[in-house]
Image: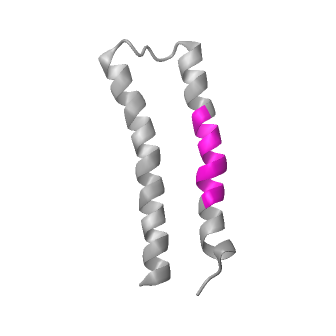
Amino acid sequence: MPSFFDSWLPFFYLYGIGGLFFVLGLVIIRRSGAIDMKKRKHRFWFRVLIGGFIYFALIHALGIIAALYW
């Protein structure tokens, strides 16, 4: 069985460090005025961005779990 460093550490690095850059990008988008949270479509796409990040992190985690334990 692979160790933590072979399986989960890259996952935490990818979504941890990558997540910081993702959140930084979202903060820049909001502060620059590129998105207006009063508009319905802007709120929708903002949620799509966040949901997409969570979705891919979950799919990736489930793939790691499936590879390690099945």
Q: In this view of the protein, which residue sits in the foreground, 4 or 32? A: 4
Left or right, 29 with reference to 5: left
Residue at 43% in and 57% down: 58
Residue at 39% in and 32% down: 47
Colour scheme used in the picture?
Answer: one colour
Q: Is residue 21 magenta?
A: yes
Residue at 59% in and 44% down: 19
> In the figure, 64 relative to 19: above or below?
below
Magenta stretch: dominant secondary structure: helix
Q: In this view of the protein, which residue sits in the foreground, 69 or 26? A: 69
Left or right, 27 with reference to 63: right
Which span of residues is magenta-colored?
Answer: 12-23
Point out residue 21 in the picture as x, y percentages from the top left corner.
64, 39
Left or right, 36 with reference to 39: right
> In the figure, 65 relative to 2: above or below?
above
> Residue farthest to the left?
40
Residue 11 lies in quadrant: bottom right
Left or right, 4 with reference to 45: right
Point out residue 28 in the picture as x, y percentages from the top left corner.
61, 23
> In the figure, 35 relative to 55: above or below?
above
Q: How many marks?
A: 0
> In the figure, 18 relative to 39: above or below?
below
Q: Is residue 52 magenta?
A: no
Point out residue 33 in the picture as x, y percentages from the top left corner.
53, 12
